[in-house]
Amino acid sequence: MTQNIVEIDNLSFGYKGRMLHQGINMVFPRGKVVAIMGGSGSGKTTLLRLIGGQIKPTKGEVRVDGQVVHTQTREGIYQLRRKMGMLFQHGALFTDLSVYENVAFPMREHTDFPESMIRDLVLMKLHAVGLRGAHQLKATELSGGMARRVALARAIALDPDIVIYDEPFAGLDPISMGVICDLIRTLNDALGTTSIIVSHDVKETFSIADYVYFVANGTVAAEGTPADLSKSTLPFVHQFVHGEKDGPVPFHYAAGDYKQDLLGYEA
């Protein structure tokens, strides 16, 4: 058994000749919470798609549990994905199903468990996120924070080795955000999983992550523990961590002369 359950090795990826990533190297140790951070459009979610085998790298490779993802057959990809649980950015619950049925869905899809066992497991997962009493509610009856917690219960339904979180704090109020933060860390440690978090939320992510990668301009611009990165003097990291307007990431998108655009003459 390798120490790192996910390894990204010299990975490059692009769309139609435009390179999004160039020479990315990352490792995700077993049992740790690792975050991928960076500005909008830096390709964070694309890295999650590469890990899940939805797309193939232009160069380099992604290994999950020692297996190169993009060389797998369709069945091989499905086997690797069974090691993963996914918390989508806005939960992505089935709106016509109850909370219970949402959590039961992956169990019925991927196992031959009898309904009595599925019932026990669903209630256990919902209890872990504090929502066992809401199992009969429809997804449309839930608040944003509750929906995210149900989605988390579904993500851990099959006790995956890896849980992937795509912007888990987006759109949540401070209380719900704190609850989700605590759940990610607690469940990670209790289940012994590896958690991979993509997020813009510095405070929340730094409070639970063991290690953080900052992605910018197609490369890993910085990496380290939250404590190290909080003290970083690298301009991009300092601007991102402290939410400053001025820095390597400009406020204005590149444009022509302002006077010429407004008045139609050259300065």
Image (cartoon, rainbow, N blue to C red):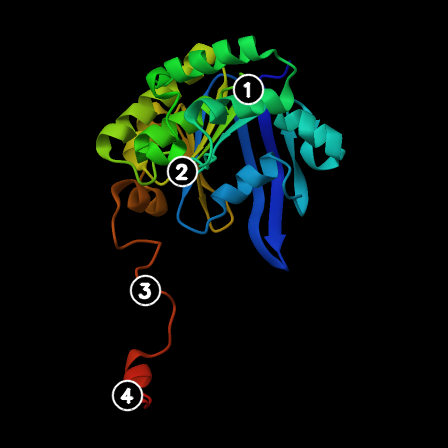
Q: Which tag, 1 or 3, sits closer to the chain's start?
A: 1
Nearer to the camera, 214 or 264: 264
Q: Is residue 56 above or below residue 177?
A: below
Q: Which tag, 4 or 3, sits closer to the chain's start?
A: 3
Check disc 2 and give the amino acid type: Glu
Label of residue 198 in the image: none
Give the residue number, with chain letter if any, for mark 2: 167
Check disc 1 and give the amino acid type: Pro
**Does dot 3 land on a helix, a strand or a loop?**
loop
Q: Which tag, 2 or 1, sits closer to the chain's start?
A: 1
- Residue density around tag 4, few if under 14, some if 14–19, many if 20 or more, within 10 Å: few
Give the residue number, with chain letter if any, for mark 1: 160
Q: Residue at x 64, y 13 (%)?
A: 1
Query: Residue 83 vs residue 130: left or right?
Result: right
- Residue density around tag 3, few if under 14, some if 14–19, many if 20 or more, within 10 Å: few
Q: Residue at x 37, y 36 (%)?
A: 140
Q: Position of residue 82 (x, y in %)?
A: 62, 24
Give the residue number, with chain letter if any, for mark 3: 252
C-alpha gap between disc 2 and disc 1: 19 Å
C-alpha gap between disc 4 and disc 1: 60 Å
Give the residue number, with chain letter if any, for mark 4: 263
Image quadrant holding the C terminus, namely bottom left
Q: Which tag, 2 or 4, sits closer to the chain's start?
A: 2
